[in-house]
Image (cartoon, coloured by chain):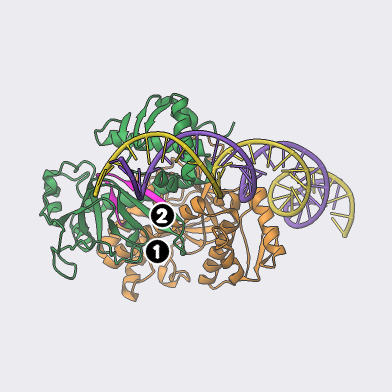
Chain colours: A green, B orange, C purple, D yellow
Amino acid sequence: MPSRRIATDDAAGAPNAGNIAHIETRCSTCNLRELCLPCCGLSRSEMDVANRVVLNRARVPHGETLYRTGDRFTSLYAVRDGFFKSTVQLEDGRRDQVTGFSMPGEVLGMDGIATECHTCNTIALEDSEVCAISFVRLQLLAHEVPNLQRQFHKLMSSEIVRENGVMLLLGRMNAEERLAMFLLNLSQRFAARGCSPTEFDMRMTREEVSAYLGLKMETVSRLFSQFQQEGLIVAQRRFIRILDGAGLRRVMGRGLG
Amino acid sequence: MPSRRIATDDAAGAPNAGNIAHIETRCSTCNLRELCLPCCGLSRSEMDVANRVVLNRARVPHGETLYRTGDRFTSLYAVRDGFFKSTVQLEDGRRDQVTGFSMPGEVLGMDGIATECHTCNTIALEDSEVCAISFVRLQLLAHEVPNLQRQFHKLMSSEIVRENGVMLLLGRMNAEERLAMFLLNLSQRFAARGCSPTEFDMRMTREEVSAYLGLKMETVSRLFSQFQQEGLIVAQRRFIRILDGAGLRRVMGRGLG
DNA sequence: CGCGCCTTTGAAGGAGCTCAATTTAGGTGG
DNA sequence: CCACCTAAATTGAGCTCCTTCAAAGGCGCG
């Protein structure tokens, strides 16, 4: 099945096709503006300008692809609601690595800027909603609003920094440490969104967690059980309660001496 | 020892301190302009504008740090000559992961944009030379030259894409595949610089290669020996000759039946 | 209620690690 | 110019952690 095309005004074709909800969005009233790219760090008046980026809101049902490798790049996507995974695949397509999970306020699609084609696949892990931000328009607007330009640069840089962290995790941590780090990271991101940092529902399967952590599903499952026995967490399938955050942090030191 | 500070005109302090060679550089005469950020893809007249970015050339002797974690971010660095590694460290500092090796024409320092402090360490693997590009000035100039803005965005995006590839390597490839991929990547990058793709001198130690590939030094050493016995390469310490590139490419399929 | 998918758990195997000894290359000073 | 010294690289043997293969358990949904 084809990945869904979310039209932005300057994209070829109808601006509002098929089953995709198209909503004129006002950033200034968006409850994610603290987290979202074009709004974060902008003053009230700048925000009015930002409203003109024309964000086309679109729903992405659970399991649907937002964009896939090879798709032409036209927009960035701010996650408004829901949860996504991004994956890269080995040519043969048999093995794939999850490069990240994205939650509300985070921005997807920056991989496509370089070649103007996407280089990974992004799939909704639950019924989700994104704001499609026309990249051409974003650039035009950023030209007028230096602060927006800066925010955008910081956003791309953060993604580089984040990926550096994942490389450290994949290259130099053992299985225990990887899962502990993963849980702490999720926890911290939920907290930043005003959700409980100690009790949350993971949206991803064990398989997807393992594809992110560079492990096998069975290993991840065993580790959840182990952490539970050690009294660090309660894990009932996707539901997680963190009982001992400090303990998890300590796990990350168990790797070497 | 402190990391070396390379002053750009708008940085606080003397613009040309100590043992650092300061040379007014003209991009239009630089033999790297095909590869380098501010020049790549720019027309002749745009290039003249680019000359005004004020690139301070600086030498970085073998083993010296260009910037380190926590250093204030002021500039990007285009590698003019030499070879660098970038590393991130676990808090304890005992384990570190090499996030990339950089060669002439490549740009370093984009990790610093997000927080205005660098989040990795970058060290010269041989006597090297960089152009320090004041980020403030780059932004001003990019504002005047849209093409430069676009090139810069593509550059950051490429870095994201590159790191996605490394995550795939670290998360889903076995040791053989990792080394094969590494050698083919080096080869291809040397080729792009007009150097022989089949015969080159690696600038990094086995230790550094292993810190990049998420393996141990001994494993990497064994693999070099193995590849040599299989007739894929000649490896005499850092000198590498690729005898059978197609064979190396085939190695990357051996990972999963 | 039964089917499919996700998850858990066990037992055995193997890829890469650890520890340790040896070889080689490059730099330095007599 | 050679002997020495140190750092890098190689190689071996045994071990460990994670994987592989297999089976059973549990939850959601038609």
Q: Which residues are magenta?
A: A98-109
Residue annotated with mark 1:
B37
Residue annotated with mark 2:
B76
Rendered view: B233 above or below A233: below
Among all residues in the image, which is located at the extreme bottom? B44
- Is B148 in front, or is A53? A53
Q: Amino acid at mark 1?
A: Leu
Question: Is disc 2 surrounded by few (<14), some (14 to 19) or many (20+) residues within 10 Å?
Answer: many
Q: Is residue B92 left or right of residue A45?
A: right
Helix, strand, or loop for circle 2? strand
Q: Amino acid at mark 2?
A: Leu
Question: Does the magenta segment cover residue A102?
Answer: yes
What residue is drawn where x is 13% and y is 65%?
A: A15
Question: Does the magenta segment cover residue B30?
Answer: no
Rendered view: B42 above or below A95: below
Name the quadrant containing residue B53: bottom left
Residue C25 position within the rendered picture, expressed as x and y whole percent measured from the top left: 75, 57
Residue B227 position within the rendered picture, expressed as x and y whole percent measured from the top left: 67, 62
Residue B83 can be seen, yes or no: yes
